């Protein structure tokens, strides 16, 4: 089977665009990615579109209405916060299966502000604040507290994740925010759900990201190998049964399973990874994933953040983009935005936040409910 | 629904909370005879081992231990904060989420594995659109 390459990839600066619609926001990233490849929508054999909030609204087709209705197959994907990565993976699979050799993947989301989750539904009376909390900050706070009970992880250690990622975002012009947030600012911000303060929650934003994927043959034919990024692994898992998962969504096991499969597929280990973009939907989550992805041993994640091992310049920089915490988290776009970030480093184009000599990078997203997608990417030439 | 409204009898906040006519309220689990997995709510196929028609109701314990929690300071309008959202492992199986009451909203006062008991009370005054009252379950430090 042919290797698959990313030959064009880009994202818009995340922000809030209430005057636009979701197709229009997605179309912008699609055109940017096509421009990056030097290609046209006329060259694409299929479109894989990831969007969550309007999953029943044919967003992919509406993007083509904005940039060229070529009549190619369009697949609309929804997979919670793994939506964009799932669309990318569907595109990858279509090339792996030798059905296509040049396709476009787009992830896009238009969001409001405010708490996600816990909105109710169901019969009878509202359950939020009666049977605990189902808001995302609380759910991920509880996941962090599970780590705290095992390893003594502290509020301060969780908060340091946010300090780091906000610092990284000051070097990323495409991040929603580029603001330094010192430790005391993070810890003294409004407490949302202990131990997550407001600055330890990802930012709800509008955004889009897109990638052009090609077979090896097509990449060579187009003469784009010098800018191509090879997809060394693409893995998607769901959450296997766990004894508490009825009331406590398990983001750990599906990540561990995906990481193991991805490292095997790529023929590399965590020690070979030069940078990681992982799913820091909340500061607590990032700590868990250091261990889930094998970046450190179980129980060492707190020490890892204390020692700066995951900061730019550290052993394995994590979320150089600013992460979901500061770049922003437009649910359906996040999975491809992460791929853009890692690809940009592999191409050596990440400017002030460049990870020196980056050769292999890993992207990770989690959709609660649950879906985990991991991609391992490598500079082709 | 109409019957309960007429008699004024409160309803359970969730289907797995049982309010017997002659006896104390309790939480009902559904247990797989094949593998022992415990669920909240009825089902015919076990999500753990895929066995069919092996699930039977079981009365869950009113005692347990605090597994994890969050202290919720920001919620939706009208919901009183702070409160403690708690995940409790019940003795003998079953994990349940609910509000932990009668504790200070301070992490220093909420140790992991704290023994808790399940108590049953009015559901914070919440009523449905038909005016029905509800009973819910809560956790509190074991006395």
Image (tube, rainbow, N blue to C red):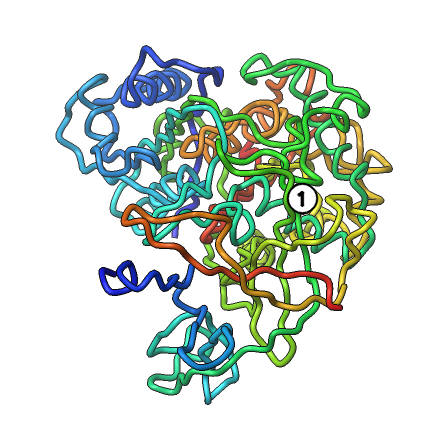
Q: What is the total number of numbered labels drawn onto the structure image?
A: 1
Residue B134 x/y as whole percent: 42, 57
Residue B90 at x, y percent in the picture: 62, 72
Q: Residue furthest left?
A: A71
Could you tell me which quadrant the C terminus of chain B lies in?
bottom right
Left or right, B91 with respect to A8, comes to: right
Quadrant, the N terminus of chain B: bottom left
Q: Which residue is mark 1?
A: B71
For disc 1, the neighbor class at 10 Å (few under 14, some 14 to 19, many from 20) is many
Q: Residue at x 37, y 74 (%)?
A: B42
- Classify residue A64 as left or right of residue B76: left
Secondary element under disc 1, as helix, strand or loop, is strand
Residue displayed at 70% across by 55% down = A146
Looking at the image, the residue that sits furthest to the front is B7
User: Between residues A263 and A323, which one lies in front from this camera angle?
Assistant: A323
Residue at (46%, 88%) from the top-left corner? B34
**Foreground: A65 or A98?**
A65
Whole-percent x and y of residue A285?
64, 43
Residue A3: percent from left, percent from top: 43, 45
A197 displayed left or right of A228 = right
Residue A234 appears in the figure:
no
Q: Tag 1, which chain?
A: B
């Amino acid at each position: 089977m042919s290797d698959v390459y990313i030959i064009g990839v880009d994202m818009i600066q995340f922000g809030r665009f209430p005057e636009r619609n979701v197709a229009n926001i997605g179309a912008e990233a699609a055109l940017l990615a096509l421009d990056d490849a030097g290609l046209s929508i006329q060259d694409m054999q299929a479109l894989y579109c990831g969007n969550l909030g309007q999953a029943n609204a044919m967003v992919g087709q509406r993007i083509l209405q904005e940039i060229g209705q070529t009549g190619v197959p369009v697949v609309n994907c929804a997979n919670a916060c793994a939506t964009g990565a799932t669309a990318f993976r569907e595109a990858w699979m279509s090339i792996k299966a030798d059905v296509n050799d040049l396709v476009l993947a787009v992830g896009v989301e238009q969001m409001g502000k405010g708490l996600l989750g816990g909105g109710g539904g169901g019969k009878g009376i509202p359950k939020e604040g009666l049977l605990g909390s189902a808001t995302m900050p609380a759910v991920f706070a509880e996941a962090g507290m599970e780590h705290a009970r095992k390893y003594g992880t502290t509020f301060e250690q969780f908060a340091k994740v946010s300090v780091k990622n906000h610092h990284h975002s000051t070097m990323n012009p495409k991040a929603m925010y580029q603001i330094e947030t010192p430790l005391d600012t993070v810890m003294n911000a409004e407490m949302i759900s202990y131990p997550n303060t407001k600055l330890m929650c990802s930012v709800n934003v509008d955004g889009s990201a897109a990638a052009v994927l090609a077979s090896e043959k097509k990449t060579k034919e187009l003469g784009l190998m010098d800018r191509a990024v090879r997809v060394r692994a693409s893995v998607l898992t769901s959450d296997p049964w766990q004894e508490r998962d009825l009331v406590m969504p398990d983001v750990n096991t599906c990540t561990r399973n995906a990481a193991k499969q991805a490292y095997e597929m790529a023929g590399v280990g965590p020690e070979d990874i030069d940078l990681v973009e992982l799913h820091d939907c909340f500061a607590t989550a990032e700590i868990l994933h250091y261990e889930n992805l094998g970046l450190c041993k179980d129980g060492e994640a707190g020490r890892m953040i204390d020692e700066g091992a995951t900061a730019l310049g550290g052993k394995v920089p994590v979320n150089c983009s600013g992460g979901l915490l500061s770049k922003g988290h437009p649910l359906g776009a996040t999975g491809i935005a992460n791929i853009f970030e890692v690809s940009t480093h592999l191409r050596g184009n990440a400017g002030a936040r460049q990870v020196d000599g980056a050769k292999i990078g890993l992207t990770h997203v989690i959709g609660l409910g649950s879906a985990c997608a991991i991609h391992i990417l490598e500079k082709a030439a | 629904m109409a019957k309960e409204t007429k008699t004024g009898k409160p309803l359970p906040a969730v289907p797995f909370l049982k309010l017997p006519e002659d006896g104390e309220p309790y939480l009902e689990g559904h247990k797989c005879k094949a593998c022992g997995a415990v669920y909240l709510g009825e089902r015919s196929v076990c999500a753990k081992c895929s066995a069919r028609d092996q699930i039977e109701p079981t009365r869950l314990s009113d005692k347990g231990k605090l597994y994890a929690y969050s202290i919720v300071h920001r919620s939706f309008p009208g919901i009183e904060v702070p409160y403690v959202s708690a995940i409790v492992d019940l003795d003998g199986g079953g994990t349940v989420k609910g509000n932990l009451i009668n504790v200070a909203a301070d992490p220093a006062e909420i140790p992991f594995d704290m023994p808790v008991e399940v108590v049953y009370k009015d559901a914070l005054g919440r009523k449905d659109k038909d005016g029905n009252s509800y009973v819910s379950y809560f956790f509190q430090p074991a006395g």
